[in-house]
Image (cartoon, rainbow, N blue to C red):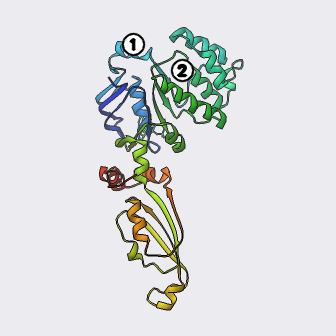
Amino acid sequence: MAAIELEGLTKDYGEVLANDGVTFSVERGEIFGYLGPNGAGKTTTIRTLLGLLAPTAGTARVLGRDVTDEDALLEAKRKLGYLPDTPAFDETATGREVLDLHAAIKGDERSEALLELFEPPLDRPVRDYSHGNVRKLGLVTTFMHDPELVILDEPTSGLDPLIQHRFAEFLREERERGVTVFFSSHVLSEVRRLCDRVGIIRNGRLVTVEPVESLLDRSGKVVRLRAAASIPREALAIDGVHDLETSVVRGGDADDADDATTAVTECAFTFTGDVNALLAHLREYRLLDLSIEEAPLEDVFMRFYGDSEEAAESASQPELSERPGGG
Ligand SMILES: Nc1ncnc2c1ncn2[C@@H]1O[C@H](COP(=O)(O)OP(=O)(O)OP(=O)(O)O)[C@@H](O)[C@H]1O
């Protein structure tokens, strides 16, 4: 049984179709990142999973329980931790009082260790807390009853780098213990560091669900080279070359034999093909410099997030990640 199962989940607010037939599962013991641009529908999915919104159509199950069955969901919630994007604590209560209340409702297996790790202030009323301190307290209340599954809405927003680092370590340890983590995020570096798989949602529709590694494969390599020759653009019109930019920095008329011999050409492109084939192809040029680096994860996300439906659809085509020698 998966920790989270969504089947055709649809939420129609009337004016906005915030979730449109969303289907995916989160397996036990994995860290799953739920990504998408602002207004894509992430919080809508999360609130539905917690029974805070009723789906218009489709089903959602948390730890095997249907979220529209109140009693079943209550049972699941004992084993669930939830960090909302803005935790709504009693503003007049101190952090300590908030923790006591949470302990009374759902139990407290380990708040002491969590307090050492996340260090929220405890003696002041919550209304005096900074945004980051509210989230630190939220992390303690999310994990204190030792849940099997945690659902986190942008967990590191507002946290300083030290606490972010501790949080990342902590999540990895939780995964080792078999805890399932489902979190929404805009922070791509953290997604890359932490997630086993990601789901990307855009305009309410899921555009892809796949391992982070395969997303990285798909983003290809950034190739930069300098050659002691003029390289005509057509020479690099080979499979897997995208966004080719070339400039001749010295000499430069390829049709002029003398000029061509003194030319230095600089090229930059994204490459999604077989790197060995590319190197074989480049052998005929005298290269002065060659660098092949991993493309930034941002690039591939931009393809999914971008304005056009077409771009998102082509980004989610499986053949790109199944190309020969991809990786
Ligand atoms: N209660 C509501 N009534 C009507 N429309 C809503 C309601 N809540 C959200 N929406 C709309 O549904 C869409 C999805 O919103 P949602 O909050 O789920 O997105 P999100 O991906 O969490 O965005 P963000 O990253 O900005 O938090 C948006 O167009 C939003 O304006």
Please give the name of the residue rendered at 47% of the width and 37% of the height, measured from the top-left corner.
195
Give coordinates of residue 35: x percent, y percent: 44, 41
Please give the name of the residue rendered at 66% of the width and 21% of the height, measured from the top-left corner.
116
Type of amino acid at the residue the image marks with label 2: Phe
Does residue 173 appear in the picture of this structure? yes
Q: Is residue 114 above or below residue 289?
A: above
> Contact, CB < 8 Å: mark 2 with mark 1?
no
Queried on whether the Cβ of the residue with tag 1 lies below 8 angstroms from ligand 1, the answer reads no
Give coordinates of residue 264: x percent, y percent: 54, 79
Type of amino acid at the residue the image marks with label 1: Glu
Pointer 2: what residue? 143
Q: Is residue 324 above or below residue 166?
A: below
Please give the name of the residue rendered at 71% of the width and 17% of the height, measured from the top-left corner.
123
Q: CA distance from mark 2 to mark 1?
A: 17 Å
| Callout count | 2
Give coordinates of residue 273: x percent, y percent: 37, 60
Q: Which quarter is ligand 1 in?
A: top left
Queried on whether the Cβ of the residue with tag 2 lies below 8 angstroms from ligand 1, the answer reads no
Element assignment for label 2: helix
Q: Name which of mark 2 and mark 1 comes first in the sequence.
A: 1
Q: Which mark is residue 130?
A: none
User: Looking at the image, which is closer to me, 214 or 43?
Assistant: 214
The reply, left or right, for residue 50 in relation to residue 57 is right
- Estimate how packed mark 1 is, as few (under 14), some (14 to 19) or many (20 or more) residues with alpha carbons within 10 Å: few
- Estimate how packed mark 2 is, as few (under 14), some (14 to 19) or many (20 or more) residues with alpha carbons within 10 Å: many
The reply, left or right, for residue 263 in relation to residue 3 is right
Q: Quadrant of the N terminus?
A: top left
Pointer 1: what residue? 75
Say which quarter of the image contains residue 205.
top left
User: Looking at the image, which is closer to me, 117 or 107?
Assistant: 117
User: Looking at the image, which is closer to me, 123 or 187?
Assistant: 187
